[in-house]
Amino acid sequence: MGSKEPMVSLKIEITRNLTEVVDLTGPITLGRGKDNDIILLDGVVSRHHARVYFDGTDVIIEDLNSANGIVVNDNRVFLRALQDKDVIQVGKTKIYFSTEIWDKPPKEVDLMAHQISEFDMQELINTRDIFFRFPSDDKSIEQIYTISHQKFEQLPLNDMEKLNLDAALNEAVGNAQRHGHKYKAELPIEYRYIHTPDHLILRVTDQGPGFDYRAELRRKKATTAVEAARTTYKAGKYGGLGIMMMLKCVHKVEYNRKGNQVTLTKYLGDAAKRFEEEQKRQLQEEQAKALEEAKNPKPPLQEVSDTEDGIDITADEDDGDKKKENDSGFIIQADD
């Protein structure tokens, strides 16, 4: 399959199990200013806070004389070579450095050029790493759904977890058909299925302009998402609930920078237990930290003013709409 090339990226945490992935192909800057590659809408982030760049095979993060600094793995740094799984903190935003390796899939099924009947159905069901490319029409999507449902049946999961996978995949593929391709059947949807002993990965890619997941987050509430998704699924329909439903049905959801690729991860067995325990531990630590800070408040981080150029970008609820001002930037709104 040739040499393995790592996918070097920054994974920006939006919520506890939602990240947005920025592939690193050259230098990028982070800060509050609209001319940054990654715009952090956070009052304690400087206009030009940090940059990340390649130095040979190393990836370097550099503090650009920011007011409040950069923290990597709980240590303040000014210049550092990043390692896989390093955790970067810039203001309120947590960013994970990643050097994942994605091998070429051993099995590829191109339904743009072939009929499903030309393939061995049992092989498609049993293959643990497989790539599908198929038209954006209802018939082809139903064929992929049927194959995936049978693959899910082989997983060490209970019926509800399998149903949740069905619903999450339907949503991802349905979004590609509806929002990405506007029901243009001739456009291909790509779908990678990877099953390892400790996790399942479902990656769906469309050819569209990209999905604005942040607008979706603002519109949808999580309280009834799963039940509504199950109703939609049982009625034989696709989609309609988007990101909130997927967040309830799998352990992790990742969007690429463009917004036309979503990766769903479901941990299995002991890996699922470890992930869920780690999530609980982090939540408890955050709650304990908030309680401690309420009892013994520390001096606040320095608020950074942008008044010198007439721009005032703060982490308010309405700031998510500022994306319209700079489509080339990648805007992250800090959670309170």
Image: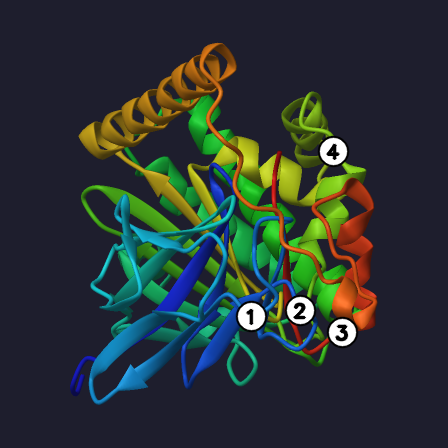
Q: Do the residues labelled 4 and 1 touch (CB within 8 Å)?
A: no
Q: Are marks 2 and 4 in contact (CB under 8 Å)?
A: no
Task: Compute the Cα span from label 3 to label 2.
Answer: 10 Å
Task: Work out whether 53 lies above or below 203.
Answer: below
- The amino acid beneath tag 3 is Asn
Which residue carries the number 1 mark?
48
Percent of width and height locating residue 106:
25, 73
Which residue carries the number 3 mark?
326
Percent of width and height locating residue 88:
36, 54
Q: Are marks 2 and 1 in contact (CB under 8 Å)?
A: yes
Task: Compute the Cα span from label 3 to label 1.
Answer: 16 Å
The disc, 3 or 4, on the residue closer to the chain's N-terminal end is 4
Q: Are marks 3 and 1 in contact (CB under 8 Å)?
A: no
Image side of residue 111 versus residue 58, left or right: right
Percent of width and height locating residue 327:
74, 74
Task: Please tell me whether mark 2 sits on a helix, a strand or a loop.
Answer: loop
The disc, 2 or 4, on the residue closer to the chain's N-terminal end is 2
Residue 235, disc: 4
Residue count near mark 3 (Cα–Cα under 10 Å), binned few <14, some 14–19, many ≥20: some
Task: Compute the Cα span from label 2 to label 1.
Answer: 6 Å
Using the rendered image of the protein, determine whether residue 119 is visible from the camera's viewpoint: yes
